[in-house]
Image (cartoon, rainbow, N blue to C red):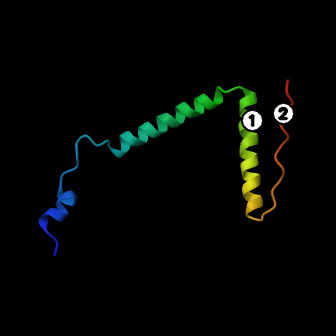
Amino acid sequence: METPESNLLISAAPSRTAPTVTELAGKVFAAKVRRRSWLASLPVEEKYRRLLELQRMVSATRRAAGKPAPAPWPDAPAA
């Protein structure tokens, strides 16, 4: 049999210091905008390097799963 103390957390009023869903969503979307802006400001060479890294990870994962995978693009020549 449940005691009144076991339902204490369920029946207690929500804390006023806890952020609301709207506040949390606002923070998440603001962080997303900042990150996208930061990524857009990266030099093209860094964007290309990150793209190659993602291609290598996808290729390795597909091959490990026994599926065909296209070869990643070659590394950019040093300038």
Please tell me which of labels 2 and 1 falls first in the chain.
1
Query: What x and y, as percent, mark residue 41?
Result: 64, 26
Label 2 environment density (alpha carbons within 10 Å; few <14, some 14–19, many ≥20) = few
- Residue 63: percent from left, percent from top: 77, 59
Q: On the image, numbered disc 1 is attached to which residue?
A: 49
Lateral position of residue 36 relative to residue 44, left or right: left
| Element type at mark 1 | helix
72 to the left or right of 13 = right
- The residue positioned 32% from the left and 41% from the top of the image is 19
Q: Is residue 64 above or below residue 48?
A: below
Where residue 76 is drawn, which disc sits there?
2
Please give left or right for residue 20 compared with residue 16 in the image.
right
Report which quarter residue 1 is drawn in: bottom left
Q: Residue 35 location, x and y as percent?
A: 56, 33
Q: Quadrant of residue 51?
A: top right
The amino acid sitting under disc 2 is Ala
Front residue of 11 and 22 = 11
Q: Is residue 55 above or below residue 33?
A: below
- Tags 2 and 1 in contact by the CB under 8 Å rule? yes
Which residue corresponds to the image point at 48% horizontal and 38% vertical from the top-left?
A: 29
- For the residue labelled by badge 2, is the local secondary structure a helix, a strand or a loop? loop
- Amino acid type, callout 1: Arg
Q: Quadrant of residue 65?
A: bottom right
Label 1: how many Cα within 10 Å (few below 14, some 14–19, many 20+): few
Q: Position of residue 52 (x, y in %)?
A: 76, 41
How far apart in space, not on screen, are marks 2 and 1 (Cα)? 8 Å
